[in-house]
Image (cartoon, rainbow, N blue to C red):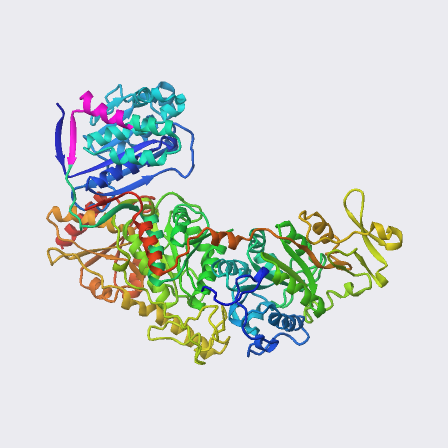
Amino acid sequence: MTQVSTIDHVVIRFSGDSGDGMQLTGDRFTQDTAIAGNDFVTLPDYPAEIRAPAGTVAGVSSFQVHFAEYDVHTPGDHPDVLVAMNPAALKANIDTLTVGGIVIVDTADFNPRALTRVGYDENPLENDSLSKYQVYAFDLTAAATAAVEPYGLSRKDAARTKNMYALGLLNWMYSRSIEGSIAFLNRKFAKRPEIRDANIAALTAGYNFGETSEAIAVRYEVASAPATTGTYRQITGNRAAAYGLVAGAARADLPLYLGAYPITPATEILQYLASAKSAGVMTYQAEDEIAAVGAALGASFAGCLGATSTSGPGLALKAETLGLAVISELPLVVIDVQRGGPSTGLPTKTEQSDLNIAMFGRHGESPMPVIAAQSPSDCFAATFEACKVAVEYRTPVLVLTDGYLGNGAEPWRVPELDELPKIETNLTTEADGTYLPYARDEKGARAWAIPGTPGLTHRIGGLEKAPDTGAVSYDADHHEIQVLARAAKVAGIVSEVPDVVVDDPSGDAKVLVLGWGSTFGPVQAAARYVRNSGRKLATAHLRWINPLPANLGEVLAAYDRVIVPEMNLGQLAMLLRSTYLINVESYTKVRGMPLRQSELADDLNAIIDEEAAK
Amino acid sequence: MTATVPTALGGLSGVPLALNPLTRKDFTSPADVRWCPGCGDYPVLAAFQGVMPDLGIRNENLVVISGIGCSSRFPYYVESYGFHSIHGRAPAIASGVAMSRPDLAVFVITGDGDALSIGGNHLIHAIRRNINMTILLFNNRIYGLTKGQYSPTSEQGKVTKSSPMGSVDHPFNPVALALGAGGTFVARTLDSNRAHFTEVLKAAAAHRGTSLVEIYQNCVIFNDGAYDPLKAADGMIKLVHGQPITYGADNAMGVTRLADGSLATAPVAEIGEANLLVHDAHADNPQLAFALAQLTESNSLERAPIGIFRDVERPVYDDMARAQIATFDDESAKLTAVSKLLKGGDTWQQ
């Protein structure tokens, strides 16, 4: 009889060849986990090459999911369970596994040639190299092939169902129902019944193998995480950002127009919106990044909410058009899914190194509001806020997410649209002879009339303008007035930015750790470790980078030491030092991966102990 | 934006018509025109403002978008909605306008540097997609605003401040380029021939899809007389759809097709009336238009066909893009669709 053990959290890493369907397997397991009521965060990790040579370490594609009965903030540093579909996957991941962790291995490819190819001199399943782990080695490929034998698939197609077999086995191990995945396969392969039935058979066979064979001694249960009631779905940061645009445009009652050019890891935003035509969304796959933002700005000029999605190299190309958006004072939302740079850099890996270009990457005095999403689901909220500011202040706004947030997923409570604030367009529609395109309201936003409005024809452009009339003017006073007005307008957005909230449970911590963007998860998780060790630590988090929250200077000044972890070489730290003349301490990692919570916790412990010893 | 008033036909279908006839003055903005005295841009502006009332559209439904260069100041002088944008990007910006607003008549004003050098990519892709806009390409064969450097249409050997020993660049033939990009309406006209310009501009506006009109335009300061060679009696070959192609004094010269398919020019007396090539701007196959474009002596400009090289129907990008998108009778229907999108298929209750 299999023993059932109750645990509070697990990190599982599915790993195999690029063609083994590991992303799909991980995604389905996550969905089944969501329905079981656990909180979770996921981390896909795949090579930049579409199909690196099969069976090589370079071609390994992985998907990590961390789920728990409490709120989860990171995908986890070290997997507790590794599912390795070939020798390369074992080789690439075994060192990250927790000591005592579980390894489930498909032995089908463990032949001398494949082992040599990845640098194993002998079969690791046959020596004692894995003795510190619980190893379950099965020929999953043979088992799956046997299970799908009745469906008459080719040998290759039959073998490909091994990922569903593994999924079934894992679902059994973690007490998840396979009903959701069966429904998914029914939808996905509706038009290919033999593939559908074979995959369902493999999935079911994997589940039944766990149930009947007693090959695996322990089965686990993770209790549901508490959550606000509502309708939930699993969402990635890229989908959330795309839907933030849709919701923003809907609440502004403006048509949404996205101009984009495919670029990793932002492409999905274009794809999701291209599939949102039923919601009235217009997308434009432009000839290049420059045309993408140009068309979006043109659409805004014509009375849409124009938006563009990109990653670092694309943002560099869009810089000139963003300057035009700043001076023409039209709404525009730019989503930058950051990746490792410079240049092509690390297209599929995450980084936060576009903060400087977001803040300062345009010529002239060219201020742009910048907001950074803190989690996959927060990409929705951050993008929605960006839409509101863009429309109400007539300005381009930059939303910074990153590869980790864009590809990572977590549960998201789907809001009803009327819960979201209305976005006021305040268009000028009446021609009473007083329209001045560059007259400003109390927020500094200019009067916006769109083409087609009778009696309000006017011209705008990239040349400097006289106040109010917007007539071209090279007058020195006019330039100074307009530069200051544009800067004051963006600075005034601080009234939309909530004060930064400090979490300091003891109330007398001396060290504050300040995160921004996607460091939110690792900082929260690390803080939990630090506090569990009896140490005192305050945390705070920034979403709006420009403008910074009004109380931030005061908050930073209240601590003896302020630590700023970033996935760059200290770009926010530099901004904070120059803004507040405070010696914040930079903590930086540029490894293409989210910060490791345990490493960050150890380093924070050391800082706190050092401070206590003073 | 639903039009409840009559709208124009053809190229401007969907654009509301003015209730009362407008005049050239109605399309003249109060801004002072600041081109150099004698600039070829003046007659083009005047002719443009003169054609607009004939299109029957309203000021507020006219949008003029430009890039950077002398001619790109044009929008400031037209009483309409206008956007003077950045170097080379006008077709990209206009694409967003045209796609999102079928009730607007979109005109792009650009030059040889703007359209063919820094903005070459946007130009060819707008033409390839056949987005509904009329592009007026002011070709003065020089960079004027930066005070006289050779442009992508300057002749090889051109001596300028940036080519003191003569330019070694080979010039573009903008008409051939547009045809190569799949242009559905491609024409050439001159700043100095108001009647011809007017006729071409009306036809360009009446065409649905991208219309590319190359305008030979004289820069009095930096490239004066660039088009003087064309003033010779046999310089210009006027193309008229359905007419045999003859030119020169007394139309004594003609164009004929040789056995290998290429075109040749010779005295009509030699060719024989029956062997004269008859212009067909509506031919599906672009070979004839392209061959005619090759009669342009792009370097010396001693000879150039003018008129409408090609005017054919092809499905229009923005019409097709709009047809794929759901429209809603009221806001609540749209919000329902948005809600459905946000929820997706795999939800659970907690």
Q: Image check: A533 left or right of A481?
A: left
Q: Image check: A356 left or right of A374?
A: right
Residue A363 located within the stretch drawn in magenta: no
Of A449 and A439, which appears nearest the observer? A449
x and y, in percent, of residue B113 in the image: 61, 61
Residue reaching furthest to the bottom: A433
Residue A213 located within the stretch drawn in magenta: yes
Q: Image check: A97 left or right of B324?
A: left
x and y, in percent, of residue A336 in the image: 38, 53
x and y, in percent, of residue A4 in the image: 13, 30
Q: From which residue to which does the magenta span run?
A: A203-221
Q: In the rendered view of the protein, which quadrant contains the C terminus of chain A? A: bottom left
The image quarter in which residue A64 lies:
top left
Of A504 and B59, which appears nearest the observer? B59
Residue A425 in sight from this viewpoint: yes
Which residue does the image show at 22% across and 38% down from the upper left? A33
Q: In the rendered view of the protein, which quadrant contains the N terminus of chain A? A: top left
- Number of numbered discs visible in the structure rendering: 0
Residue B111 in sight from this viewpoint: no
x and y, in percent, of residue A268 in the image: 39, 46
Which residue does the image show at 37% across and 22% down from the upper left? A114
Of A474 and B47, which appears nearest the observer? B47
Vertical side of A384 occupied by B144: above or below: below
